[in-house]
Amino acid sequence: METSLKLVMTFKSEGDKTVNLTIDDPRDDISETEVISAMNLILDKNIFSPDNVDLKEAVKAKVIQTETTEFDLKA
């Protein structure tokens, strides 16, 4: 069984569209303060502009843990 983590940061863009930025394999010990700081930096520096629309607000963030079991179909 393989376990993976993803950090999903949700923003609102101009026009009130929801935009998710996903980071694969964040540090296990990432803190809420670090995530908030990163999201504020993304907004302050206007780093991402999906579809040429600026992000305007940090909405939420979460770490998702997924367990994957692969089956051997060659048996």
Image (cartoon, helix red, strand yellow):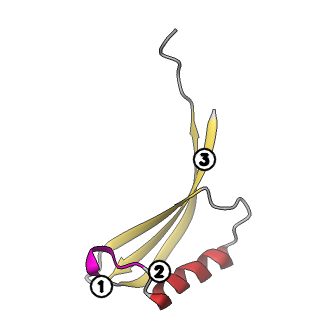
Magenta residue check for 29: no
Query: Which structural element holds mark 1?
Result: loop
* Residue beneath the point at 48% across and 89% down: 45
Residue at the extreme top of the image, as rendered? 75
Amino acid type indicated by mark 3: Ser
CB atoms at circles 2 and 3 under 8 Å apart? no
> Residue 7, image x and y in percent?
56, 62
Say left or right for 51 vs 60. Answer: left
Labelled disc at residue 4: 3
Amino acid type indicated by mark 2: Ala
Query: Which structural element holds mark 3?
Result: strand
* Residue beneath the point at 69% across and 67% down: 30
Instruction: Give the crowd class for mark 2: few <14, some 14-19, many >=20 residues within 10 Å.
Output: some
Q: Nearer the viewer, residue 60 or 19?
A: 19
Amino acid type indicated by mark 1: Glu
Q: Which numbered disc flags the more N-terminal residue, 2 or 3?
A: 3
Say left or right for 16 vs 9. Answer: left
Query: Which structural element holds mark 2?
Result: strand
What are the residue bounds of the magenta stretch?
48-53
Residue corresponding to mark 1: 14
Q: Is residue 43 above or below residue 25?
A: below
Residue corresponding to mark 2: 58
Q: CA distance from mark 2 to mark 3?
A: 24 Å
* Residue beneath the point at 61% across and 82% down: 37
Instruction: Give the crowd class for mark 3: few <14, some 14-19, many >=20 residues within 10 Å.
Output: few
Q: Is residue 70 above or below residue 43?
A: above
Q: Which numbered disc flags the more N-terminal residue, 2 or 1?
A: 1
Residue at the extreme right of the image, as rendered? 29
Quadrant location, the N terminus: top right
